[in-house]
Image (spheres, rainbow, N blue to C red):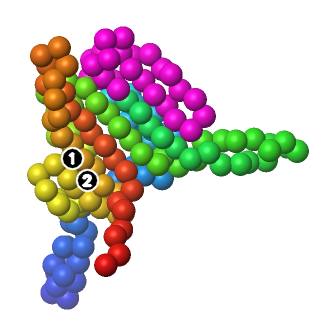
Amino acid sequence: MKLLFLFLIGLPFFGKAQCENFIGGDTTVATSIIETSKKYLQFPMVSYSKPGFVLLRDKAEFCTIRINYEMKNTLVGAELVKMPGGITSVYIGGPWERVKKLYDEYFLPKIKCAIEESPTVSVWNNQKLVHIEYGTHSGIAIGFIKIEPQKVTSK
């Protein structure tokens, strides 16, 4: 009986959803976001990456994936080398129907614990995700997903 009581008391804590942290994530997280986004957007994309960010675009400029990350100094032997650090922001733009599906099927399950500030803004663990339809390109509805640190405002 005591075991059943302890189980029932602890059940809400075990069932609580955990949110994935994208901001501060390493290159593994970035690679996962990029590969998944490319599958949903369905456009061949070209990389224009430089130190500090990864940028992919299609030729017709329907889609953009940009992941910014901090650069950190690391010693490799006796040399000081700049290496990618944690992710600082994520932007995925493209045809709204595909961006919305990416949000619904990939991102939303990973942020179930997030607080919804509005129908298009969710916040969790000092991170904010915005997903919005914002215009058209060649008659096709366009939208984006943006993940960035949640800015704390003082009163």
Q: Position of residue 95 (x, y in %)?
A: 20, 24
Local SS, label 2: loop
Relative height, residue 127 to residue 64 (above, below)? below
* Stretch in magenta: 38-64
Graded by Cα atoms within 10 Å as few (under 14), some (14 to 19) or many (20 or more), the crowding at tag 1 reads some
* Residue 92 among magenta residues: no
Q: Which mark is residue 111?
A: 2
Relative height, residue 87 to residue 154 (above, below)? above
Residue with the most extreme front position: 155
Q: Residue at x 34, y 53 (%)?
A: 20
Per the image, the residue denoted by label 1 is 108
* Residue 45 among magenta residues: yes
For this view, does 26 lie left or right of residue 23?
A: right
Local SS, label 1: helix
Q: Look at label 2 and name its amino acid.
A: Ile
Residue 124, by quadrant, is bottom left
Q: Position of residue 53 (x, y in %)?
A: 52, 35
Determine whether label 2 and label 1 are within 8 Å by CB: yes
The N terminus sits in image quarter: bottom left
Query: In front: 18, or 149?
Result: 149
